[in-house]
Image (cartoon, rainbow, N blue to C red):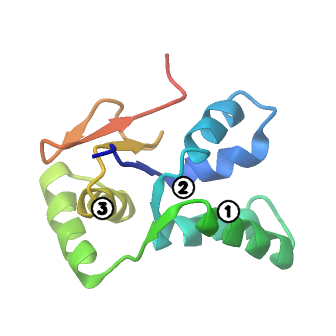
Amino acid sequence: MTARFFADTNIAVYTLGATDLKGPQALAIMRQRPVISTQVVNEFLSVMLGKRKFERAQAYRLARILMRRCDVVAVTPEITDLSMTIGERYQLSHWDSLIVAAALTSGCDTLYSEDMQDGQVFEGRLTVRNPFTG
């Protein structure tokens, strides 16, 4: 069985800055068809429309490309329930615990993110990797 990995929102966002320091690492991850959740797609859109000030049509086009190039899992009631357990157990923000719960439920063993502690292991089977350190 091939190892599955999950990409947090920041990885998807950094692919649009391919010339800066984080862009090449982000692109390398996203080219391998990671798992993402509907939360990641919505956070990506929020950044594109807000902070990055993209026109709506362009932001939507990019989000559709993102969804085609990744395995997208929906945030379900079960994932939300697991995220509350994860949030309490590991003292994570609600949004980070939703990412972790989606990754765990999807059978991922690696979570690429710069928002959580590099090397942290959740439930003995999901390891956070910050691709921008080292």
Q: Where is residue 44 drawn, in percent x and y?
A: 62, 63
> Vertical placement of 133 versus 123: above or below?
above
Q: In the rendered structure, which disc, 1 or 2, sits on the residue that comes first in sequence?
A: 2
- What is the spatial separation of the Cα atoms under label 1 and label 3, in whole angstroms? 25 Å
Q: How many marks?
A: 3
Q: Which residue is mark 2?
A: 9
Pick whichever, 98 or 90, lies toward us: 98
**Nearer the observer, disc 3 or disc 2?**
3
- Tell whether 125 sits left or right of 45: left
> Vertical placement of 109 versus 77: above or below?
above
Q: Where is residue 32 drawn, in percent x and y?
A: 54, 44
Pick whichever, 125 or 56, lies toward us: 125
> Vertical placement of 134 versus 86: above or below?
above
Q: Is residue 93 visible?
A: no
Query: Crowding at label 3, few (<14), some or many (≥20) Cα neighbours within 10 Å?
Result: some
- Tell whether 104 sits left or right of 72: left
Q: In the rendered structure, which disc, 3 or 2, sits on the residue that comes first in sequence?
A: 2
Q: Which residue is mark 3?
A: 106
Query: Crowding at label 1, few (<14), some or many (≥20) Cα neighbours within 10 Å?
Result: some
Identity of the amino acid at label 3? Ser
**Nearer the observer, disc 1 or disc 2?**
2
Pick whichever, 4 or 25, lies toward us: 4
Does the residue at mark 1 contact the one at mark 3 (Cβ under 8 Å)? no
Residue found farthest to the front: 1
Q: Secondary structure at mark 1?
A: helix
- What is the spatial separation of the Cα atoms under label 1 and label 2, in whole angstroms? 9 Å
Q: Which mark is residue 47?
A: 1
Q: Residue at x 61, y 45 (%)?
A: 31
Residue found farthest to the bottom: 77
Q: Residue at x 84, y 78 (%)?
A: 57
